Amino acid sequence: MFDVLREFETDILRCLRCAECHAGCPVYQDDINESYAARGKLRLMRAVMDGEIELTEGVMERINRCLNCNACMARCPAGLDTDMLIIRARCEMRDAGIPVPENLAAVRANIAEHRNPFGLPFSERGGWAPPEALERRSDLVYFAGCAVSYSQNRMAKAALRLLDGADVEYAALGPDERCCGDPVRRMGLEREAEQLVAENREALRARGAKTVFTSCAGCTKTLKSTLGDEFEVLHVTELLVRMANEGRIAFEKAFPKKVVYVDGCDLGRHAGVYEAPRDLLARLPEVEMLEMPDNRDKAICCGGPFVAAYPELAKKFALARIETALSIGAEVIAVACPTCLINLKEGAKSLEGDRRIDIQEVATLLQRSAKPVKK
């Protein structure tokens, strides 16, 4: 088992055993056990590869209990791509006939049948979108993503209202859109992920897309890595910064709050988008921008990737991020990811007493202050 990792044996051996990966891993911090940190996972995988230990349920649980947040790689002096190695290990488990973990089986089945993790019908995927956007062809096409389409469509509406105010023409895929493939790829189901990528590529071609923008951080990461060879892929904040720099969007309503932007792992470490959300938020009149102690590439994951598999852990990790935000005096947490938004809101429910913090998505927050500047 894990023979596929032979190709990367030299990389695995480069692990310095320095424990830098411990500091950024919420899973390890929750259970101070070496096997939950990247360093320990690599040692377990190599031991299985060399036949020193069996691939037991316990070993598989360690490999599965990973946020794939890439915080370990950001801190690794040797630059090990632990995220890639863990996903490859999961792929080999799937290829060997080992099923996905029971707590993710329903998500996989929903994506296979309905092309979204929630098992909801195609007809509901674009119900929030302007009808004309669903019908037109355009160089600029909106890819909402599953969570935005089905659960957080306020994010989509806010982003599209900002573009409407800037007189930007765009198309939206709506029911022609499929899951980007990231959830099944994380499970080690590469072929299923590739099929979804192929379906989305054809849908985008059919609309005449040259630039694709999305409100979902996971979709941004995935589309950039899988479709970036054919289309320019932007997170919506990157597109909005362009519009603002061109004078097509301005902000006039004061927002006299202390705001901290919390970097999402997919948008930040995986997709390299750090400054666009901050740039936009800083344009709000009277806003006071704060920073988390661990930010940008050293940001700590909020636990969002565990929402389906380990919901209690996800909530616990979210509460830890909220406590940090409160400790620096933040009144508002701003995020640019639907999964972060969902999980942080869930974590905030655990705040005790009269402590409160507002959790907002960037485009939704901006839309309240926007002054359209139509050409």
Image: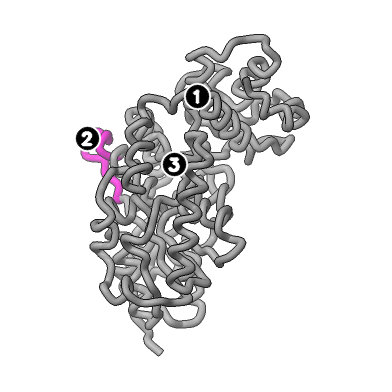
**Disc 3 residue type?**
Pro
Give whichever of discs 1 and 2 has the lower sequence position.
1
| Residue matched to label 3 | 183
Check the picture and name the quadrant holding the C terminus.
Answer: bottom left
In this view, the residue in front, 195 or 265, is 195
Secondary structure mostly seen in the magenta stretch: loop
**Disc 2 residue type?**
Gly
| 317 in magenta | no
Percent x, y for residue 232? Answer: 56, 67
Identify the residue at horizontal 67%, vertical 9% (top origin).
52
**What's the CA distance linking mark 1 and mark 2?**
49 Å
Task: Label 3, secondary structure: give it.
Answer: helix
Mark 3, other Cα within 10 Å: few <14 / some 14–19 / many ≥20:
some
Q: Residue furthest bottom?
A: 375
**What's the CA distance linking mark 3 and mark 2?**
36 Å
The color scheme shown is one colour
Identify the residue at horizontal 70%, vertical 25% (top origin).
18
- Residue 65 vs 265, above or below: the answer is above
Give whichever of discs 1 and 3 has the lower sequence position.
1
| Residue matched to label 1 | 97
Task: Label 1, secondary structure: give it.
Answer: loop
Residue 15 visible within the image: no
Mark 2, other Cα within 10 Å: few <14 / some 14–19 / many ≥20:
few
| Residue matched to label 2 | 353
**What's the CA distance linking mark 1 and mark 3?**
19 Å
- Residue 59 vs 130, above or below: the answer is above
Q: Mark 1 or mark 2: which is in front?
A: 1
Residue 172 visible within the image: yes
Give whichever of discs 3 and 2 has the lower sequence position.
3
